[in-house]
Image (spheres, grey):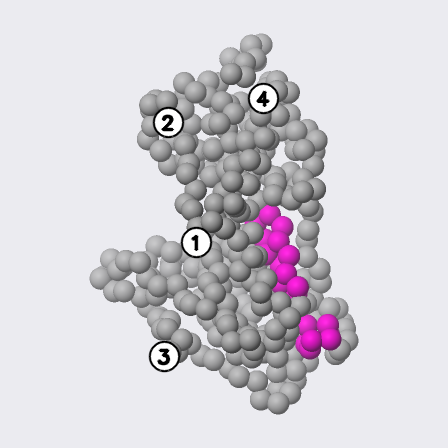
Amino acid sequence: MPEGPSVRKFHHLVSPFVGQEVVKTGGSSKKLNPASFQSLWLQDTQVHGKKLFLRFDPDEEFGSLGNISLPESLEKGERKEEASDQKQASGPSSQKISHPSSQSLELVAPRGDHGLERLRGDTPAEGAERWLQVSFGLFGSIWVNEFSRAKKANKRGDWRDPIPRLVLYFGGGGFLAFYNCQMSWSSSPVVRPTSDILSEKFDRGQALEALGQEQPVCYTLLDQRYFSGLGNIIKNEALYRAGIHPLSLGSLLSPQHLEALVDHAVEFSADWLQGKFQGKQQHTQIYQKEQCPGGHRVMKEAFGPPGGFQRLTWWCPQCQPRLPPDGQAQVQIS
């Protein structure tokens, strides 16, 4: 899934639409009815780690209808949509989204107060679930005022454009298209800036304590409780630049090594984000490489906690030597 820098860029793309009303909708979502967004106002947007949060209210006065909740997530529908997204990622879908000039998406325009009636009828009377939580899949993205286009034909030779999960047209004239993502409603955004690697409130002490556990550091780096927004690319790059083998136990690493690892994780993430705003492609030194910058052969293997998700990991045995089994010798910082 997109890592912290990418989701921060999505947040930047969505922000100009804050304060505008949704006037038309479209998309393939079965879990959340696109029509339920009609006549709602986008009032706020926040980002935390790999998740984007959007607040919608029934009117521009921040919800004059009172305590009304929006549709709850449907777990079964979520799994079906995720499977559909994975199918689209491996090969374009059989459906097609055309350019705005020749819309093939189903667009629904509000008629009078029907949008609000639908909101009342589809939701329980209690609770105020107005924050839309967006979690992106492997190829998840947000497009502004244009649709994603097929970059190549599938195995059958068909050129089919990806299908957006949700399309929101706003009163200001623009629109947002959400691709390959899971969406659910909540009463408030789940935001813990102390664990967000791109937040000014990121708690280095908490991160260092977590890394010092007696488990491979490559597991800990992907733990969103301590390194929210850090994904597989950042993990690989930070470990290589710190000269640490991915399976090194944190408890055997020196404080200097742990400090260096956190520094590289934060610095690489910040540089990646800055590059995104400048339109530059992020340069990696070890991720998906066959040779490291030193000319050594790179190893690749899937690592993950027992019973947990295994992630492909690239490392250089020479630049990232593994600690001796007894853990007595400490690798020195160069």
The residue beneath circle 1 is: 139
Of tags 1 and 4, the one toward the viewer is 4
Query: Local crowd at mark 1 within 10 Å, few (<14), some, or many (≥20)?
Result: some
- Number of residue marks: 4
Q: CA distance from mark 4 to mark 2?
A: 20 Å
Query: First in sequence: mark 4 or mark 3?
Result: 3
Query: First in sequence: mark 3 or mark 1?
Result: 3
Identity of the amino acid at label 2? Cys
CB atoms at circles 2 and 1 under 8 Å apart? no
Q: Nearer the viewer, residue 270 or 252?
A: 270
Of tags 2 and 1, the one toward the viewer is 2
Q: CA distance from mark 3 to mark 1?
A: 25 Å
CB atoms at circles 1 and 4 under 8 Å apart? no
Q: Is residue 176 magenta?
A: no
Q: Which mark is residue 247?
A: none
x, y percentage for residue 104? 38, 78
Identity of the amino acid at label 4? His
Q: Quadrant of residue 249?
A: top right
Q: Which mark is residue 102?
A: 3
Q: Quadrant of residue 221?
A: top right
Q: What secondary structure prevails in the magenta region? A: strand
The residue beneath circle 4 is: 257
Name the residue located 47 percent from the left edge and 57 percent from the top edge. Answer: 141
Magenta highlight range: 44-63
Q: Nearer the viewer, residue 104 or 176?
A: 176
Q: Is residue 194 above or below residue 40?
A: above
The residue beneath circle 2 is: 292
